[in-house]
Each structure stands twice: as structure tokens, then as C-alpha cells.
Image: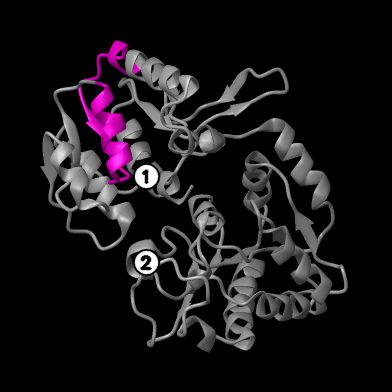
């Protein structure tokens, strides 16, 4: 989710610079709502950036790499990519699997970073681009600029609008209260600020008159329910779909989260965010393109080792620290 949201400003910039181009995207099926919206009959109603979407269920493929279903889907993807007769393929993820998928298109130009996230991926590229930006969004824009030699700048991402989800969000948040979204989960434990501290922040925000919604991602329901219990059940737990999360985030006065997809979604939608960071570097993966505050201890060091326990520097951030910057941003939002 985060990789797609970080790539969207670059691809949106390409779309705006070259409105006549055909731009397609290969994506995991579970993230398609970031690129297109459908109505209740399955008809596409919003696809603002891309022309066509190809699905690569790489997570499922890894679980059963030699199954008949996996091999059939890979062959279908290879055939449809080659039928696309692409002039260029961009690997904006910088992973071995994304570079391999790019090679399936059999395009003479497979463009990737000189120093991709997974270094071995560079040997699959026909063109390597040395990027200089600090933030991954800036690096993606430099990579996209290499397609035609454009001078591109990050563009405000265009996310699809699902009319059913928008109506649902309007009904859920009916009333005059400013709403705050809290996302307690993270990709691994070292990035996860303690749930009891989120609970304290939620309770204080409710006491000050704000509506609090807690997002529960896959396997994160216990975290969200613990925060709701800390507020006496007043905070609303959201277990909805991705299209619902997009619609709801559009209406938030503030989003509080660690380095995780919902935080980057809020940035893409221009919503204010409080980022609580530990082992990941906010200069590369932090909030971008919106009003934000980042809390990170000087004791924290960049480390992508997937430890289960919260990183030591993360534990030095107290609920009062988060509450203070949250109220600052909420005051700014209320004055707008």
C-alpha cells in the first residue's frame, strides 16, 4: 500500500505531462482500490491515473509457486503485458519480484534505480537511474522523468472516488464534530507504538470534543478494540474495506499513525498527520505533501530488521508528546 501511494505522485506527474500516453499499472489485486473504483455492479466509475490495470497476485504465488493456478496466472500476465507492446516499463518498487514482473513485458526499456531497495534487482534493468532525492517520492519522480527526459515535480496524487463508500462515510461521520483517525498497526512490531499509549491519546481527544475512529487493518482488530476500551467504547472501530478507508480518510481533521499505509494515504489525500517514527527514517519514508508533525527520538537508528518488540527510541515518545502536536494541527485545521 505504501509503495503504491509513494509512486502515485510520480505517475500522476507523468499523466499530467503526457495526457495522451497509455499508462498501465501492475498491482496486487488487494490494492486495486487505490487505482480504480467500481460501482455496485462492478462497473469502473473512477480511474483517474491509469488506463489499464494488470493483476499480479505475488503474495499468493509465493505460497504455491508451482500450483496450476499460479502458473496459469503468470502465463496470462506475461501474455497481456507483451500484448501491451510497451515503449517503457518503470520499476518503482525496486524489488526483485517487481523487476521480474517488469521483465515479463519483454520491453527493451526496463527502467529502475541505480541503487534499488533490493540491490539484486538492478541487474534486471536495461536502464539504471541515479536518484538524488532524500524522500522516496522524490526518487520515484526522478525515475519517472527518465522515460522521456522530462523535468517532473511531485504531483498531488489522484485517487479514485467510490460513490457508495463516499455516501457511507458521510453517514458515519454525520454531525459537527471534527474527526481524528488513529491507526495503531504497523508492518512489524518494531514500528508499533504501544497500544495503551494510543488509548491515552484517544481518550484525551474525546474529552476535548473530537470524534475518534480507530482503523483496524488485517489481523489488527485486537489493537483497535483495546484503544476503544480505553475510551469506554466511545471510539469507533473501523474494520471496513480499503475503499471505505479512502472515503473516511478524506473527511479526517487529523490522522495519527506510525510508518504505515494509512498514514501515507492521509498524505496522498492532503490530510494533516502526526507520524510516530522509530526504526524507519522519516526523511525517506515520512509524511510528504501535507501539513504534518513527526515524532522520532534521537536515539532511533534506521533498522528494517523485523523485530517483534517496539524499538527502544520509539518507547521514549510519550502520549503527551503526541497529544501536544495533534492539538496544534487540529487548531490549525479548525482555523482554516
Give x and y (percent) for residue 269: 53, 50
x and y, in percent, of residue 75 in the image: 37, 17
Rendering coords of residue 44 (x, y %): 59, 21
Of the numbered discs 2 and 1, the one sitting upstream in the chain is 1
Q: Which quarter of the figure has residue 244? A: top right
Q: Residue furthest front?
A: 66
Residue 304's label in the rendered image is 2
For the magenta stretch, what is the residue range? 81-105
Any part of residue 336 in sight = no
The image quadrant that residue 136 belongs to is: bottom left
Where 66 falls versus 323 (above or below)? above
In this rendered view, identify the residue nearer to me: 93 or 309. Answer: 309
Disc 2 on helix, strand or loop?
A: loop
Residue at 53%, 59% in the rendered image: 263
The answer to whether residue 115 is above or below residue 38 is below
Q: Which residue is mark 1?
A: 7
Amino acid at each position: 500500500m505504501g509503495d503504491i501511494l509513494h509512486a502515485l505522485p510520480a505517475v500522476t506527474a507523468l499523466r499530467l505531462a503526457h495526457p495522451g500516453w497509455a499508462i498501465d499499472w501492475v498491482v496486487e489485486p488487494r490494492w486495486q482500490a487505490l487505482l480504480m473504483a467500481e460501482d455496485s455492479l462492478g462497473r469502473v466509475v473512477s480511474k483517474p491515473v491509469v488506463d489499464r490495470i494488470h493483476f499480479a497476485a505475488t503474495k499468493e504465488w509465493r505460497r504455491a509457486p508451482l500450483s496450476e493456478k499460479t502458473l496459469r496466472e503468470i502465463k496470462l500476465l506475461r501474455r497481456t503485458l507483451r500484448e501491451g507492446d510497451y515503449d517503457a516499463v518503470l520499476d518503482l518498487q525496486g524489488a526483485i519480484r517487481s523487476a521480474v514482473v517488469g521483465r515479463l513485458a519483454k520491453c527493451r526499456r526496463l527502467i529502475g534505480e541505480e541503487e534499488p531497495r533490493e540491490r539484486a534487482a538492478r541487474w534486471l534493468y536495461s536502464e539504471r537511474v541515479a536518484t538524488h532525492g532524500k524522500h522516496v517520492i522524490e526518487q520515484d519522480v526522478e525515475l519517472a522523468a527518465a522515460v522521456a527526459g522530462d523535468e517532473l515535480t511531485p504531483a498531488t496524487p489522484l485517487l479514485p472516488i467510490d460513490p457508495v463508500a463516499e455516501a457511507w462515510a458521510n453517514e458515519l461521520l454525520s454531525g459537527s464534530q471534527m474527526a481524528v483517525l488513529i491507526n495503531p498497526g504497523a508492518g512489524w512490531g518494531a514500528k508499533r507504538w504501544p497500544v495503551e499509549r494510543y488509548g491515552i491519546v484517544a481518550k484525551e481527544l474525546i474529552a476535548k470534543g473530537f470524534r475518534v475512529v480507530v482503523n483496524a487493518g488485517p489481523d489488527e482488530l485486537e489493537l483497535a478494540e483495546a484503544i476503544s476500551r480505553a475510551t469506554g467504547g466511545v471510539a469507533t472501530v473501523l474494520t471496513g474495506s480499503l475503499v471505505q478507508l479512502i472515503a473516511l480518510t478524506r473527511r479526517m481533521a487529523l490522522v495519527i499513525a506510525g510508518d504505515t499505509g494509512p498514514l501515507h494515504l492521509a498524505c496522498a489525500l492532503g490530510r494533516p498527520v502526526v507520524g510516530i517514527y522509530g526504526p524507519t527514517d522519516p526523511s525517506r519514508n515520512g509524511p510528504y505533501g501535507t501539513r504534518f508533525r513527526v515524532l522520532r527520538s534521537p536515539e532511533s537508528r534506521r533498522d528494517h530488521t523485523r523485530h517483534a518488540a517496539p524499538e527502544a527510541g520509539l518507547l521514549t515518545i510519550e502520549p503527551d508528546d503526541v497529544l501536544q502536536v495533534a492539538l496544534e494541527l487540529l487548531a490549525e485545521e479548525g482555523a482554516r
